[in-house]
Image (spheres, rainbow, N blue to C red):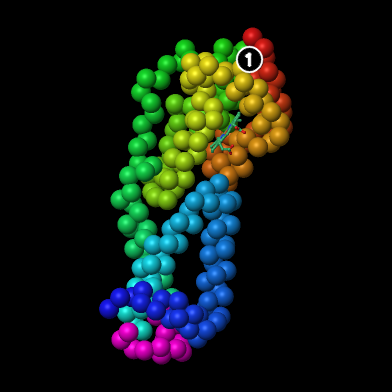
Amino acid sequence: MNPFAQFFPRLFSLARRHLILTSVLVLLCLVFAFFGFWIGFIQIVVLLVPIALIAWTLIARRIAKRGESGGMSEAIAVCSYIALASVATFAIIQAVPYGKDHTNPSNYNRQYEPNWDSTATRDLVVRACYGCHSNEVEYPSYSKIAPISWMVASHVDEGRSAVNFSTITKDGNANHDLRESIEIIQEGEMPPSYYTHFGKHPEAKLTAEERQQLIAGLTATANR
Ligand code: HEC
């Protein structure tokens, strides 16, 4: 049996039989997408694809066996299959290699850092920015689990490619990167709000005073 034969007619008639359940599921998908956006990793919505494929395979098998039965028992079966598909997807994605490598580039050498105006400035940048913009990333234990590992890897990859404070002078854009950093801190965009959600990384939550101190320190460093 091909579970995807007559996919759309079967899907639509299933949705029509279970209008409330369908609305709840659509709403849950939207909440999931909003959550992805909120944690700065909208890409997480791709997980809905394997969940839907696995769940549909199970649902189609049930329809082939019992017909379009409708009613409570079919609704419960659909919910169980979706739950099962979610657990299976979570298990399967643990095998994806992306995000597993937590080694910082080994050729790390402080000589390529900016010519900091003071150690206080460096300390603030380490606290607020090094989690994504350096070769000294400290990976928390929960970042071993997919899809969190994917989220962390994507933030570090994108962060490093924008600005890497560990290689900033070697990369040749030190002054430009420092000025861009000052601007982006003034705009309140960095560190990103998602970095301190759930009480994570409290050291990166700067007070207004520390923020001013950081801007002044980066300005002094850029003017050296
Ligand atoms: C949670 C990881 C994370 C932290 C912490 C973080 N950044 Fe970023 N940063 C990113 C990512 C991801 C990007 C690239 C995508 C974007 O612009 O949102 C980025 C981009 C940037 C850019 C380039 C912006 C542009 O428009 O090209 C600058 C400059 C920057 N960050 C500075 C900082 C500074 C300064 C800090 C500390 C005060 C900081 N970031 C903290 C993740 C982070």
Residue drawn at x 30%, y 75% is 2
Image location (x, y in percent) of residue 188: 69, 36
Q: Position of residue 117 (x, y in %)?
A: 62, 12
Q: Is residue 129 above or below residue 65?
A: above
Which quadrant, please, contains the N terminus? bottom left
In the image, 60 versus 113, the foreground residue is: 60
What's the magenta bit mostly, secondary-structure-wise? helix
Q: Is residue 80 visible?
A: no
Percent x, y of residue 202: 57, 38
Ligand number 1: quarter of image: top right
Residue occupying the point 48% across, 16% down: 170
Q: Which residue is mark 1?
A: 221
- In the image, taking residue 131 as reference, residue 181 lies left or right, namely right
Left or right of 69? Residue 178 is right
Q: Quadrant of residue 215?
A: top right
Q: Residues within 10 Å of mark 1 (few under 14, many from 20)?
A: some
Question: Looking at the image, which is closer to me, 105 or 217?
Answer: 105
Tell me if residue 73 is in the magenta stretch. yes
Magenta stretch: includes residue 100:
no
Name the element at disc 1.
helix
> Residue at position x 30%, y 50% from top?
95
Question: Horizontal placement of 137 versus 4: left or right?
Answer: right
**What segment carries the magenta color?**
64-78
Judge by depth and name the residue closer to the eye, 73 or 16: 16
Q: Amino acid at mark 1?
A: Thr
The answer to which image quadrant residue 9 occupies is bottom left
Q: Is 74 above or below relative to 111?
A: below
Q: Residue furthest left?
A: 1
In this rendering, the answer to whether 7 lies above or below 130 is below
